[in-house]
Image (cartoon, coloured by chain):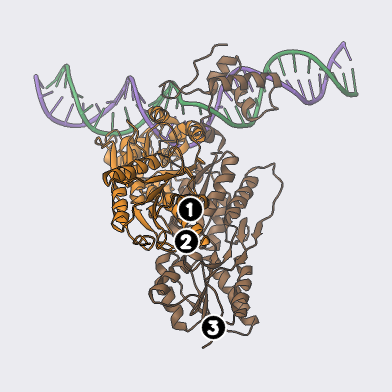
Chain colours: A brown, B orange, C green, D purple
Amino acid sequence: MRMPRAHQFGSGDRPVTINDIAAATGVAASTVSRALNNPGRVNAATRERIEAAARELRYVPNSQARALSSGRTGAIAVLVSDVTNPFYFGVLRGTQMQLKAAGYAQLLIDTEDSGDLEVELLHKMRRSLDGAILAASRLPDRSLAKLAEDIPLVTINRNVRGVPSAIIDTPAGMSQAAEHLISLGHRDIAYVSGPERSWPNEARWHAVRAVATRHRLTFTRVGPFPSGRRSGSAAADAVLNTGATACIVFNDLLAIGILQRLREREVRVPEDLSVVGCDDIFGADFCHPPLTTLTAPIEQAGRVAVSMLLSRLDPAAPAMRQSVMLPVHLTVRGSTGPRATG
Amino acid sequence: MRMPRAHQFGSGDRPVTINDIAAATGVAASTVSRALNNPGRVNAATRERIEAAARELRYVPNSQARALSSGRTGAIAVLVSDVTNPFYFGVLRGTQMQLKAAGYAQLLIDTEDSGDLEVELLHKMRRSLDGAILAASRLPDRSLAKLAEDIPLVTINRNVRGVPSAIIDTPAGMSQAAEHLISLGHRDIAYVSGPERSWPNEARWHAVRAVATRHRLTFTRVGPFPSGRRSGSAAADAVLNTGATACIVFNDLLAIGILQRLREREVRVPEDLSVVGCDDIFGADFCHPPLTTLTAPIEQAGRVAVSMLLSRLDPAAPAMRQSVMLPVHLTVRGSTGPRATG
DNA sequence: TTTGCGACGGCAACCGCTTGCCATCGTTTG
DNA sequence: CAAACGATGGCAAGCGGTTGCCGTCGCAAA
């Protein structure tokens, strides 16, 4: 067995290929390839020799070459609408874990809240990806469905027929949030809308409205506001103008922004205005006052999305559910309280 | 000019290759390749015809194929020690912007605070990367330098001879922080250490100690603590045990954790204990009380790191500085105040 | 007019790996 | 005992680009 010297860091020598292994073990390169990827297709004894040599030579497969001939790239893209939104931290943590465990690389893509950019990037990278997770697609249903025919997709918080998804059931939680406020005596409640074309935003608003109807109340809707703390000022002002004594906010980021603005305007929370957020992101528990919010299993959503995607890529995998719903629960903190009687 | 029909989403047809373009324009594939990558090497008129055809056919280069033959992959890895640490949000935002602008893909890698994992992953992916940015290497200097011979590297907040770096000059800011506390009357000041093998942690402690010496004071050091809010409890308790009236904390994440613990223990901030953080991460401004901290240009660090890396990859680029220092400044908020007289 | 040279394109050999197809061989089956 | 078959391994054709080398051609210099 001729053994080219093992590859060392910093030594400038040529990386080890399957040909080196083939030469070392005296078989053909194709056999090496099979032994490594398709065990069972090759005699056990031969395979062991090959594996030993591979280990010995510190063989690392060249993923480009593999991708070129097999079409599988070993990379999954995760698209978020804005990397700076803490909501995605959780998602990324979840996807990260799961992908790493499965040996996939994670490509982070920021779509900057633009559907066009989303399509364009995805199209460009199509051949370099095994699949993608859309954590906040701004695409219309039709485009999304079409895209899904072209590349394996899983969405998070977005329900489109034919596209598997992991959905955080915040809408269901909305009734908890609303009941909470109603039981505290609030009758004038505002819903603060997030970005216009956000699917979860619409879903949340519908849910809120349904609760209102059930209680024969009328909730006001203000917005839309781009999600982000910045928008908090305008949102807070808008809420105050409605005369509401409580509000449910599209997400925590916006809610925290509102809290800040209220402080500036010396509106007391929760005495003058109760605030409920959604998601329970990093910061929701230590802002002032701590935010009552619908705690979402964000990280789990990321994990689930990856599992769905991977099982989809594996032809041998059992068929799986098209969509997974993840329950949320209300976490009551300091930003909600009884309606001021006066 | 024979024109294969343009590729459409959802149509299952074969992606367009340079051969299609070659056939369409009647030139050789190699000419197409040159026209697209090496303009100037090809006649302007021909190039235009080729470019037109490429546009017409919606040609998208296959990055794997390109990588295989040229060695350039168009991907840059960004290694962070923990995706959930908000400090990296800023870094990622910076790298993201800059990489996207330059047409590179960003691979996010979480090293889970492990040097071994760091080396292993980097080694495995070596051939699939054009370079890497280490946002928080836990590697010893030697390993890092060795690795840098093998793959273009830029570090953030880590100074190793021979490896270009973007360094946030928090140590320099430490004197501002310390002077601030001293001028408020504090004499017993504690430094709360971050993770043991963190380079910035050591640098910050050295700086703090230098200031102490200059003022003929003795600062206590407590820790080390893993960075993360969780560690805040232990850290807070440790600080209180020293009898210090103020503390400077390795980073904001830990500082926020400390703040929470102090609240639990009903220690008033800043009346009983002043707290200064580092970095000014998301949350530092809205926690309670808002955190006095050394504001770091985190996003800029990401951008700078990418620029350095890219200019390094471009052989035609002008030589650049080995290391860039980014200044910080003290942002005074509510968590620091005069020493209680009594 | 001849020589020389630069500009421009084509040829073909890779890059490292996968995979369809075929050859071989020992064995089970009719 | 012959035919059929499954297990195993080799051959070679790609996958889509890149690039060194060479041929051709037009034009300026000698």
Q: Which quadrant does the C terminus of chain B fall into? A: bottom left
Q: Residue beneath label 2, please?
A: B267
Residue D25, horizontal then vertical, whole percent: 25, 29
Q: Amino acid at mark 2?
A: Val
Q: Residues within 10 Å of mark 1 (few under 14, many from 20)?
A: many
Q: Are marks 1 and 3 on the same chain?
A: no
Residue at x 28%, y 41% (from the top left corner):
B324
Q: Residue beneath label 1, please?
A: B236
Residue D26, horizontal then vertical, whole percent: 21, 31
Q: Left or right of B156: which side holds A136?
A: right
Work out whether residue B234 or residue B157 is closer to the camera in this orientation and state it.
B234
Q: Amino acid at mark 3?
A: Asp
Residue A161, horizontal then vertical, whole percent: 62, 61
Q: Can the viewer see residue B313?
A: yes
Q: Can the viewer see residue B1?
A: no
Q: Residues within 10 Å of mark 2 (few under 14, many from 20)?
A: some
Work out whether residue A317 or residue B177 is closer to the camera in this orientation and state it.
B177
